[in-house]
Amino acid sequence: MTEDEELIAEIKAQAEKAEEIRPEMIDVSGLAMTIGAKFPHRSVDEIKQKIIDVWRANDLFYTE
């Protein structure tokens, strides 16, 4: 599995957790910083955008 595939898998796992606590909001910036520590090959801003894309696809609530 490539680093980007691992990154997306991590984001999707976080989305599943967010679905369980719906309708509470997730702080995307905070989550991006947390995930970014594990995936330094991408910037926090790139990770943040990927999180937003996944959250939107799953109709989850978030704040930036």
Image (cartoon, rainbow, N blue to C red):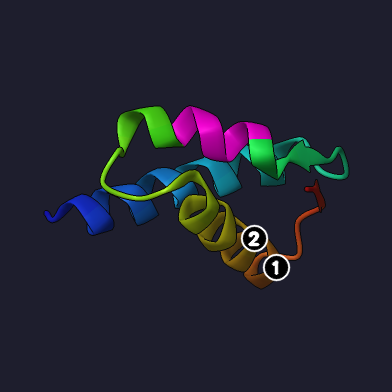
Residue 48, relative to residue 54: is it above or below?
Answer: above
Q: Hey, which quadrant is residue 20 in on the image?
A: top right
SS state under label 2: helix
Q: Is residue 32 magenta?
A: yes
- Residue 51 on image: x %, y %: 57, 55
Q: Residue furthest right?
A: 23
Mark 1 lies on residue: 56
- Give, as a single range, the part of the protein colored magenta: 30-35
- The N terminus sits in image quarter: bottom left
- Residue 28 on image: x %, y %: 68, 44
Q: Which one is closest to the eye, mark 1 or mark 2?
A: 2
- The residue carrying pointer 2 sits among few (fewer than 14), some (14 to 19) or many (20 or more) residues within 10 Å by Cα, namely many
State if disc 2 and disc 1 touch (CB < 8 Å). yes
Mark 2 lies on residue: 52
Q: Is residue 16 left or right of residue 6?
A: right
Q: Residue furthest left?
A: 1
Q: Is residue 9 left or right of residue 6?
A: right
Residue 37, relative to residue 20: is it above or below?
Answer: above
At a point 13% along the width and 56% down the height, the residue shown is 2
- Residue 32 on image: x %, y %: 55, 40
- Overall secondary structure of the magenta stretch? helix
